[in-house]
Image (tube, helix red, strand yellow):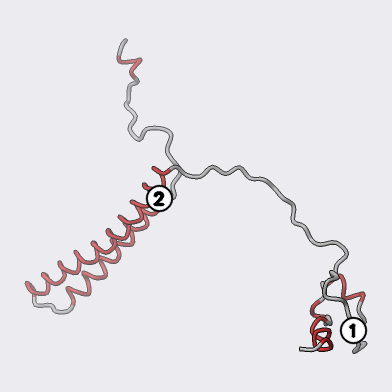
Amino acid sequence: MNEQDQQADTTPTPNDLWPDETSKVDVQNTEIPSVPANEPLMDEPFEAPFIPVAYTPETTDETVRQGGLAWSAGIVFFGSVAFMLFLGWLADLLFGSSPWGLVVGIVLGSLIGFIQFFRISSQIFAPKKTEPEHRPFLSRDEDEQ
């Protein structure tokens, strides 16, 4: 490439300019003034405001818990479809209703699998519970009286 080709490549077109700078260029005029490549088109560069955010990474135990629940969600989904498929196959053998037992088994297994998958995945992203799940009717203070 020679020097004239490089200057032709750096010549801005109206599409290259920012919207507030289009008023500086006469679009009616076919000639666009050349701008050197090292000179910025805008007066000031845009800078986004920096807002610091507090971040605490999850503990290793929490990450392992989430990974285990994710694996169990996949296994439960596959297992429910496979188990219901097997029951549908047995129903076809007993009742002679081939292929309806397989079809019903796959549909029911998929339905059960999706329900379990969503139930387990909601546990993965649920916030930690601070209070115990089981609360006695009487507190320990009342037992001593």
Q: Amino acid at mark 2?
A: Ile
Mark nearest the camera among 1 and 2 is: 1
Number of numbered tags placed on the structure image: 2
Q: Amino acid at mark 1?
A: Ile
- Residue that label 2 marks: 124
Q: Is residue 91 above or below residue 11?
A: above
Q: Residue at x 17, y 73 (%)?
A: 101
Front-most of residues 80 and 93: 80
- Residue 30 image offset from top left, x and y in percent: 90, 89
Q: Which mark is residue 92?
A: none
- Residue 78 image offset from top left, x and y in percent: 26, 64
Image quarter hosting the N terminus: bottom right
Q: Is residue 31 above or below residue 124?
A: below
Residue farthest to the top? 145
Task: Answer few, some or many: residues within 10 Å of disc 1's Cα (few below 14, many 20 plus, some between 14 and 19).
Answer: some
- Residue that label 1 marks: 32
Front-most of residues 67 and 143: 67
- Residue 55 image offset from top left, x and y in percent: 57, 44
Task: Answer few, some or many: residues within 10 Å of disc 2's Cα (few below 14, many 20 plus, some between 14 and 19).
Answer: some
Quarter-wise, where is residue 99 in the image?
Answer: bottom left
- Residue 58 image offset from top left, x and y in percent: 47, 44
Front-most of residues 71 and 32: 32
Q: Residue at x 32, y 10 (%)?
A: 145
Q: Earlier in the sequence, mark 1 or mark 2?
A: 1
Q: Residue at x 30, y 64 (%)?
A: 111
